[in-house]
Amino acid sequence: MKLRRTPAAAAAAVVLALTATACGSGSDSGSNGDKITVGIKFDQPGLGLKTPDGTYAGFDVDVAKYVAKELGFAEDKINWKQAPSAERENLIKNGDVKFVVASYSINEKRLKEVDFAGPYFVTHQDLLVRADDSSITKVEDLNSKKLCSVSGSTSAQNVKEKLAPKADLQQLGGYSECLTGLENKRVDALTTDASILAGYASQKEHQGKFKLAGLSMSDENYGIGVKKGDSELKGKINKALEKMVSDGTWDKLVKQHFGPSGYKNDPAPKIAG
């Protein structure tokens, strides 16, 4: 005798199948229930750096660990994923990461594609110069100097096009190359976010060699990128950031990662909500 499936039974079977598929997919924007994937930089000392022994260090890394813990994920439950500047929005939108903490400045263009928790840090475009060089005290002094930054850097273009148009701009492949040129006096200054410059200057091999000029040529509000419309996650991260400031962890981490460079950081910013 052949049993016939009723329409109600068939519908129930479809619902069960879809539920099973959803539970087993592990594709919930960088989280599979047991672990969480977080985007960071792998090549920025002081912020996000993958070390030779395969661990990760920096202010952004520690902020991400704190937030993940508040979300219920211990450090050993975090999968770290490299988040190059040009790929951050795609990583978030495609669900490859749950959130991104990677010197990620909040701006109108990015807000069209992703949402941000925070800001958790405010920095400014600045210059790194040799410790014994007192010839650069204002941005106009660059008009007679050799300025270095990485190829395609918006920081370098900001100086060249708006602030010191006569500067001899040299764009190299990476900040490490600029640092070598600065140390060897082939260039006079390196420009990007002050937090990034402080991270490089704080490295043991660089301590005492360089200093920040202390110029504020732009305002950069670092936020934590999340998927557009995910107000629940954004709210949870904001609560974690508020706690990080109130319990003293924020100050501790800033001093730990940027202090050796003499970087004078802004106070913790107010969370936008």
Image (tube, rainbow, N blue to C red):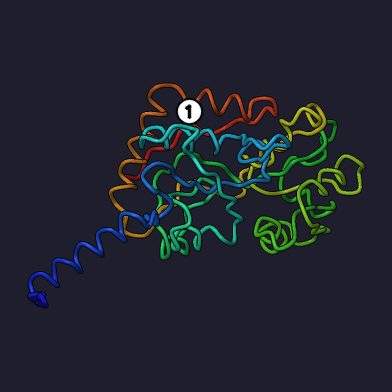
In percent of width and height, residue 249 lies at 46, 24
Q: Is residue 244 left or right of residue 17?
A: right
In percent of width and height, residue 175 lies at 76, 48
Residue depicted at 43% across the width and 42% down the height? 35
Judging by the rendered image, the residue that carries numbered circle 1 is: 250
Nearest the viewer among 187 and 143 is 187
Q: Is residue 7 above or below residue 216?
A: below
Residue depicted at 61% across the width and 30% down the height? 264
Q: Is residue 86 left or right of residue 38?
A: right
Quadrant location, the C terminus: top left
In percent of width and height, residue 203 lies at 74, 31
In percent of width and height, residue 88 lies at 53, 57
Quadrant location, the N terminus: bottom left
Q: Is residue 76 above or below residue 192?
A: above
Q: Is residue 221 left or right of residue 259?
A: left
Nearest the viewer among 216 and 57 is 57
Q: Is residue 163 left or right of residue 182?
A: left
Q: Residues within 10 Å of mark 1 (few under 14, many from 20)?
A: many
